Image: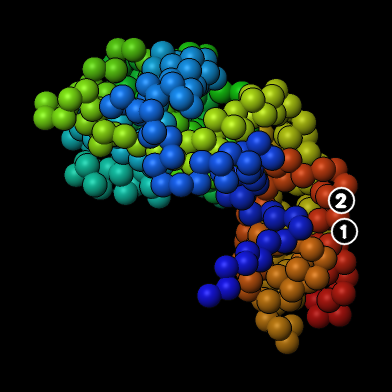
Amino acid sequence: MDLKRECPEINLNPIQRGGILTPEAREALVEWADGYSVCDFCGGRLDKVQKPNIQEFIYKDLPEFLGCDIARTTNGAREAIFAVMHSLRKRGKYILADGNVHYTTKIASELCELELRMIESSGNPEYKINVEDFRTEIETEKPALAVLTYPDGNYGNIPDAKRLSEICRNLEVPLLINGAYSVGRMPVKLTEIGADFIVGSGHKSMAASGPIGVLGMQKEYESEVLRISRLAKGKEIELLGCASRGATLMTLIASFPAVKERVIHWEEEVQKARRFSQEMEKLGIVQLGEKPHNHDLMFFEAPILYEISEKHKKKGFFLYQGLKERGIGGIKAGRTRVFKISTYRLTEKEIDKVISAFSEIIEENRGLL
Ligand SMILES: *Cc1c(COP(=O)(O)O)cnc(C)c1O
């Protein structure tokens, strides 16, 4: 089998941009590549291993970064969401989430045998979530847990998490912030938001080689979510004893200083995304979701490219090929009508290159319009 990866010079796929390893993480990946590499000096608890110093990361660095009392790593954002839902499942009959929820939240509720109710977004074109709508639903019946996708993975919309935290606090419903696309990209602190749980994804937004996730919570939930096994001494049952173990965790730790630094520059990322969106719109490619946009993940609708695809001999593949020839990837082959793009950590020059590529591809096919 050919084990070489085909990787474009500029990868626009939103799921890829925040997971590119730092040189430190790439080094750690090789150093800790063997199976249970971090377990050589384990006394029974992964989170307390001191060589390498996982303990310091889990008990000091990570909670500080997430702005919470207690933190753990998991095998992904979805596993963290599931762990919380599963722990709190007896508090209510259902999970209440926003309508832009990620599919993994749907599956987690399904696996917990909890019904999922969703707050509808405003729909086309902005797909905004009005968090006030959570109140009505909660007042009718209390859910086991409320989940806010912050931002969502489709439109990159940032809903009012602080306001929802107030609502949930007043109505005594625990709130989980799904920060798979925010933790590690933008500054987010659980205490500042005022919610109860925060979840992040190492391979999506923290320059880690996944799968790995992070879970932060306030102290009052520790005994409920991190309850100890009756059968296996000292093991946290919801994490099945140990979660992320090995190279995935070490790449997260290795990238952490750089990740802490990069969130400080978030405003520049927002400005880059906004400029990109404006330039795309000049070409007749419309950005859906919040405008002006507040995140690097953007959803575009491109009727002009779709129209070309209907007449082009390569059908929809002309776009993929045109971009590929210019060293750009991340939009699925064949797609033209709608697609997602992230400009996260691209340089201004790279962004210009992407805009020129779209512009040239449209001009080359002007005759078909
Ligand atoms: C990617 C994503 C997830 C899943 O993250 P994993 O770490 O792969 O489990 C969950 N929620 C949202 C909003 C995402 O974008």
- Identify residue for label 2: 352
- Identify residue for label 1: 356
- Relative to 37, say whether 160 is above or below: above
Q: Position of residue 160 (x, y in %)?
A: 52, 25
Inspect the image, locate mark 1, and give the three-letter code of the amino acid beneath it: Ser
- Tell me the quarter of the image containing the C terminus: bottom right
Inspect the image, locate mark 2, and give the three-letter code of the amino acid beneath it: Asp
Q: Seen from this angle, which residue lies furthest bottom? A: 313
Say if residue 101 shows up in the picture. Answer: no
Q: Position of residue 67 (x, y in %)?
A: 50, 16
Q: Are marks 1 and 2 in contact (CB under 8 Å)?
A: yes
Judged left or right of residue 136, residue 2 is right
What residue is rendered at 63% in x and 43% in y?
26
Judged left or right of residue 56, residue 106 is left
| CB at disc 1 and ligand 1 closer than 8 Å | no
What residue is rendered at 31% in x and 24% in y?
43
- Relative to 238, say whether 336 is above or below: below
Whole-Å distance between the Cαs marked 1 and 2? Answer: 6 Å
Question: 184 and 240: which one is in front?
Answer: 240
Count of numbered tags: 2
Element under label 1? helix
Q: Seen from this angle, which residue lies furthest front? A: 40
- Relative to 97, say whether 70 is above or below: above
Q: Position of residue 352 (x, y in %)?
A: 87, 51
- Relative to 187, say whether 248 is above or below: below
What residue is rendered at 71% in x and 70% in y?
320
What residue is rendered at 64% in x and 29% in y?
259
